Amino acid sequence: MENCCGLISAKKDPVPLKGIDVEVEVSDHVATVTSILQYENKEESPIEAVFVFPLPGDAAVCHFSAKIGQTEVVAEVKEKQEAREEYDDALSSGQQAFLLEESEQSPDVFSMRVGSLPPGESASIRLEYVIELAVEADDGLRFCLPAVLNPRYQPQGSEGVSGGSGQPQVTSVPASLVPYSLSFSARVTSPRPVSKVESTCSLDPLQYLNTEQTQATVRLAAGHRFDRDVELLIYYKDAHQPTAVVEAGQHAGKAGSLMGDPVVMLSLYPEFPEAVMSSVTSCGEFLFLMDRSGSMRDTGHYTGHEQSSRIGSARDTLLLLLKSLPMGCYFNIYGFGSSFDHIFPQSVEYKQDTMEEAVKKVEMMDADMGGTKIHKPLNHIYKQSCIPGQPRQLFVFTDGEVGNTKDVIDLVKKNAGSHRCFTFGIGEGASSALITGMAKQGGGHAQFITGTERMQPKVMQSLRFALQPVVVDISVSWDLPKGVSVTPLSPPITTLFRGQRSLIYAQLTGESSSASEGSVKVKYRLEDQPFNYQLLFSLKPTEGSGLTVHRLGARTLIRSLELEQRDQRGQQDGAEKKRVVELSIQSGVSSAFTAFIAVNKGSGEAVQGPLIRRNVPTPSFIGADGAQGLHLYTGHGASPKTRDKSRVPKLFSPRLPAAPFPVYCCSMAYADADPEPHSRQPPKDTMLQLISLQKASGSWTLTSALVENVLGKSKDQVEKSMPAQVSQEVWTTVLALIWLHGFKMDAQDEWQLLAMKAVSWVRAQKVPNLMECMEAGNTLLSCKVQRDAMGL
């Protein structure tokens, strides 16, 4: 197959989407996103424009409308098959129609159809959704507008993707060749001052709108090329503050219904006593599942001196994880692609020889295992018996190019009682539905690593969560005024981590005075000790919040019901599906079983001429590694000789093609290609070199590689400076700790756990003249590190 890139079709068909204008309203930790998509038909025949695009997996899509000339048509939410039939009937009769629906396999992928757009006609499509902002490791709130949709690898035989999905296949082009523009602006409002707003994209300067700095605006700089997601990190002063928002129901809403009653959103930060949290567990079975598919060769991660491939950054991160594990635990490492493998036949005890063997094999890891089939290795892991007294902790690293998202999430949920699942979405276009869904159902925590972010700090935060004592027996109770009852919309809280937010949505039914107060109490046990956390809140509705909280609450409940429906697949009742459809229609929020449909009946005159379909290309992130070209065909115009379906990572298949589709090509790696391994050089980062030399016990031995390459001294200098009655291993370990505290404090969140292990080892040696050792180390390395600062 010849190499090619760019937007290619036999007739060079025009793309009807001309521009996207996105406005974001951030209110504290909730965002309302409005996207305006401008379409124009410059052809001589009426067209149907089809656009498949990503949205955040937990977004609540709540509005879809179209404006043609001076006529505005607002879409209704209807049962999906009914909406499709109404759309097809409208096109058959020459009417303009608009259809928006989410993928049946992945809730972070939507398709939009703009039908019967006459020659010379323009249409403006308005799409709105609301979303909670995730809390990052550094206390920032993360907003992400996915601009990149990577082709999702669909394992053969998976359900719901090609068979009857009713949605077109994704068409991809390199980001630099996307033929439409993007305008993006955000307005941030909070009760607390906005400290700063950062992004992986170029932004215009932050503009404050008031002297208190509680309101600010920011815009995406001109020239964005769709080569990355638009990510904002928003920082407030005193970010971790519990909040409560009570939102009044719709005026026309029926009392007792979700949209008619008030809904409360509580943002909780349960307290964890320092005395309990300072103890780090020394047991556990730590399983690392690493994506080694071809797409992991893409570049984009910063290792300290230069850009690294995703797999290169993952190797460095695995090294850091291996050095940070506690003695006495168990571990294993899995790699997956089209197939999967493991370093050990089963989990082994963590000690020097097993750690060394694992490090050697990690150093040889490459992105050479083909597609992204994650279901089979997960299923294999879950079939392995758990080790008594060693709680299972699963760490999953993937770029998220998976098509059977819901099947994977269901598998994690089915096995939630046997483990905690921590997930890491690597690179642009990683499926947010997959990453957040696995972590939520597995009682863990999700992280996203994009642009030039270092992977290590986020991964180490998750390891610290995994090493925290497990919180059990979590319960939530309410204390409300007489006459007010509560209906929870959120699933029960199953996991609590220190420093992380817990959100609760609930419907409040009944009458109360505006001065009334309520409270919610969270009870839990930690290290066999009972704890309570209580939040008081006013029942007076918050002004100006619209129906944002209702829609987020509805979305939370819809997702829970969809999970229950999949659990009961094959049963005839279908009560959950029926309830999802009713709730989706009532709240106006999208679901897997409904779609937005709008028909412009206008003057009643039918659009004349044969309808031609035009697929709008979605940007795909292309690595700069000279990968082979992959042809993605969107219709039946491809030559049977070149249409090797086994090599194409499918997401959707077209329904009934109205006419030959344009053919697009994009430069990217084959889904099952086996690229040549990269030639590897020793790590250039001095901190990584120091980490690689640490022993499983936490100590370091005196080697030329350590003293010369890291400490910058000769071995003779180090040996002559060593105090009397101190072993060489203690002396070297103290020097390594001084070097980390003296020169790498900016990366403390990365090496903190392995340093704690080293400190524990030094303490166990009962060194009589440790203060003299510290003073000699400071003199040798020209530092001023205090013994107390190191925990010695």
Image (cartoon, grey):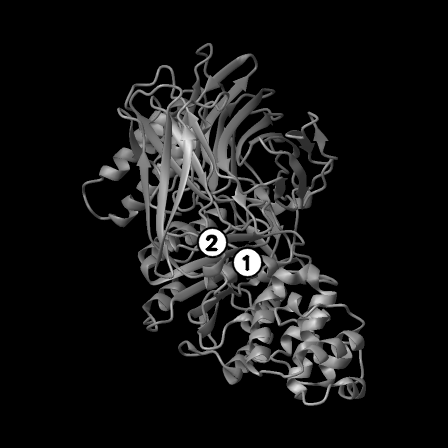
- Of residues 625 and 700, the one nearer the viewer is 700
Is residue 381 something that shows in the picture?
Answer: yes
Left-right relation of 50 to 316: left
Is residue 610 something that shows in the picture?
Answer: no
- The image quadrant that residue 344 belongs to is bottom left
Q: Position of residue 328 (x, y in %)?
A: 45, 77
Left-right relation of 633 to 713: left
Amino acid carrying label 2: it is: His
- Of residues 600 and 92, the one nearer the viewer is 600
Secondary structure, mark 2, is loop
> Which residue: 72% across, 82% down?
705
Reply above or below: 537 against 629.
Answer: above
Earlier sequence position, callout 2 versus callout 1: 2
> Which residue: 35% across, 72% down?
389
Q: Which mark is residue 445?
A: 2
- Of residues 343 and 265, the one nearer the viewer is 265
Left-right relation of 231 to 260: right
Q: Nearer the viewer, mark 2 or mark 1?
A: 1
Disc 2, disc 1: CB below 8 Å?
yes
Q: Position of residue 150 (x, y in %)?
A: 55, 49
Reply above or below: 372 against 580.
Answer: below
Residue ID for mark 1: 461
Q: Position of residue 587 (x, y in %)?
A: 37, 27
Q: Categorize mark 1 by other alpha carbons within 10 Å: few (<14), some (14-19), many (20+).
A: some
Screen quadrant of the N terminus: bottom right
Screen quadrant of the C terminus: bottom right
